[in-house]
């Protein structure tokens, strides 16, 4: 199962749980494209801590999808944070990156909070202070600086 959580948009939180069929994976890619095409930039947090190993066929399909949508991803996605607790899943994701280099910055972290902090920093670095503040609050991260809060009220 692949769950989409967008209540913190422009942060898209994807949760991979257990196994998923090729059909579910194709539906995930369709929905992912719809999300990326929303107005404005976004960051994707991909949480795999509850996932089983990713089949090589899904790795290949993800790399192919990234190549097909490279211009869109480069334009719209400020970054991707992969939450990975399993060595096998990390190896699978490394295969995806090797098959088709990511057209945006990415990171591998072991906890959702670390991914949230990375995303908040990316938004802040891009001048998108309001999403940064909301993400920090949601994940219970270090508070934003006073100047960030003032800017966030206007952004």
Image (cartoon, grey):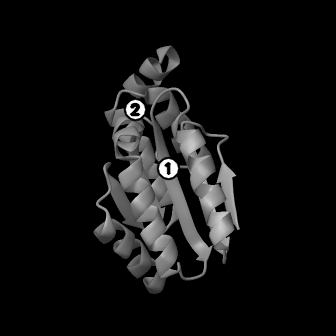
Relative to 23, is 128 on the left or the right?
left
Q: Nearer the viewer, mark 2 or mark 1?
A: 1
Foreground residue, 114 or 102?
Answer: 102
Residue 151 in the image, given as x and y percentages of width and height = 42, 19
Residue 44 is tagged as 1
Residue 70 is tagged as none
Q: Which residue is mark 2?
A: 145
Q: CA distance from mark 2 to mark 1?
A: 24 Å
Disc 2 and disc 1 in contact, CB within 8 angstroms:
no
The residue shown at (52%, 43%) is: 136
- Looking at the rendered structure, the number of numbered marks drawn on it comes to 2
The residue shown at (59%, 40%) is: 34
Look at the picture and state if 83 lies above or below 10: below
Residue 46 in the image, given as x and y percentages of width and height = 52, 60
Relative to 143, is 74 on the left or the right?
left
The residue shown at (43%, 47%) is: 119
Q: Where, by quadrant of the figure, is residue 94 drawn?
A: bottom left
Foreground residue, 100 or 122?
Answer: 100
Look at the picture and state if 129 lies above or below 154: below
Q: Residues within 10 Å of mark 1 (few under 14, many from 20)?
A: many
Residue 61 in the image, given as x and y percentages of width and height = 47, 66
């Amino acid at each position: 199962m692949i769950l989409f959580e967008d209540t913190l948009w422009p942060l898209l939180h994807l949760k991979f749980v257990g196994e998923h069929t090729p059909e579910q994976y194709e539906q995930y890619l369709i929905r992912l494209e719809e999300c990326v095409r929303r107005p404005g930039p976004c960051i994707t947090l991909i949480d795999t801590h509850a996932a089983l190993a990713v089949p090589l066929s899904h790795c290949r399909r993800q790399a192919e999808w990234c190549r097909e949508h490279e211009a869109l991803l480069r334009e719209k996605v400020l970054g991707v944070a992969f939450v990975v607790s399993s060595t096998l899943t990390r190896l699978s994701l490394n295969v995806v990156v090797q098959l088709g280099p990511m057209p945006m910055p990415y990171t591998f972290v072991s906890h959702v909070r670390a991914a949230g902090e990375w995303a908040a920093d990316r938004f802040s670095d891009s001048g998108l202070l309001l999403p940064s503040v909301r993400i920090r609050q949601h994940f219970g991260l270090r508070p934003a600086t006073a100047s960030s809060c003032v800017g966030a009220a206007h952004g």
